[in-house]
Image (cartoon, rainbow, N blue to C red):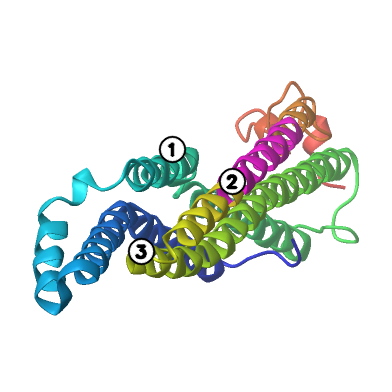
Amino acid sequence: MGATKSLDDINSILDKFSNQIAEIRDQPAKVDDAFRKAAIAAAEAEAATFFGLAGAVAGAIYGAMNEDDFTGYMQDHKEAIKKKIQELLDKLQGAVDSLKAPIAFLQTSEAWTTLKGKIGAAQNNEVNNGNVTGYWAGAAALKYTAARTLQDTAMDSAKSTCDKMADALTKISDTAWDFYSKIVTDVADLLIKLGKAFTKIATFVAAPFGISDAIDILGTVISNAVEYTGKLADALLLQRQSIGKIKESTESQKGFHNDHWPRSASDDFNANSPNSEWQAT
């Protein structure tokens, strides 16, 4: 899968996939056109055999008018190719429905990374401005230092959670990118080969080879789509389990007593009723 993919990488591959789905949906019309041309070519050839050029023209007109009555073999296979195209679209429907998911995963991952940065900035401010060592001693200083240590520990725990969530979500996005990139490569090859197959069909003479080519390449891509979808499902399940473990790890995190952010030491200080523990020494 390689390096983590950027938002531009993901948008690019998803745009290609969307355009290819539109092209696949156009293929049944191209099938009809190829077989229509084959019917015309067949009628022309048959009429020319018996009636010469004039017969060929008449045969072409007759073939165009009666293309749906084309020989049983051709008509049956025309429908078979169209059914294969629909089957492929059906197999890819889940991928069509999930187009926005990789983007959402990556954006959410970036949100966790941003949150980590904000926590880090707050922690740096606390480190730079909150240290009173050498300036304050006694019981009050000890209470402050203990509270400060808990706050710092909690921020470390929170940043760790951000890292884990961002990493898990990025992996999900990368897994989806890997799935779509494989599909895009296969469909690009499919569209080229279908075009060549339709050209053979349209000549009538090479139609059996074109029919075989079209059915074979559609079958291969359908099979691959099923395989890729299965691998995607397995990968997403593993990531779901990973996120579940992260959720479990957020319970009773270090620095979070009873799953709450640690109290500031100032919560214990009452300016109107100071006790001896808060007296400076």
> Which residue appears farthest toward the top when viewing the image?
258
Q: Is 12 placed above or below 117 here?
A: below
Spatial CA span between label 3 and label 1: 30 Å
Residue 225: give its label: 2
Q: Which of marks 3 and 1 is nearer the N terminus?
A: 1
Across and down, in percent, residue 184 comes to 54, 61
**Element type at marker 2?**
helix
Spatial CA span between label 1 and label 2: 10 Å
Q: Residue at x 41, y 41 (%)?
A: 80
Main secondary structure type of the part rendered in magenta: helix
- Which quadrant would the N terminus be assigned to in this image? bottom right
How packed mark 1 is, by other alpha carbons closer than 10 Å (few <14, some 14-19, many 20 or more), is few
Q: For residue 263, say whether it is visible.
A: no
Spatial CA span between label 3 and label 2: 31 Å
Which amino acid type is marked by label 2? Ala
Q: Which residue is drawn at 54% across and 51% down?
A: 102
**Element type at marker 1?**
helix
Across and down, in percent, residue 272 comes to 60, 31
Q: Which residue is drawn at 78% across and 61% down?
A: 127
Q: Mark 3 points at which residue?
A: 204
Q: Which of marks 3 and 2 is nearer the N terminus?
A: 3
**Element type at marker 3?**
loop
Range of magenta residues = 221-242
Please report contact status of discs 1 and 2: CB closer than 8 Å, yes or no: no
Q: Name the residue under label 1.
A: 90
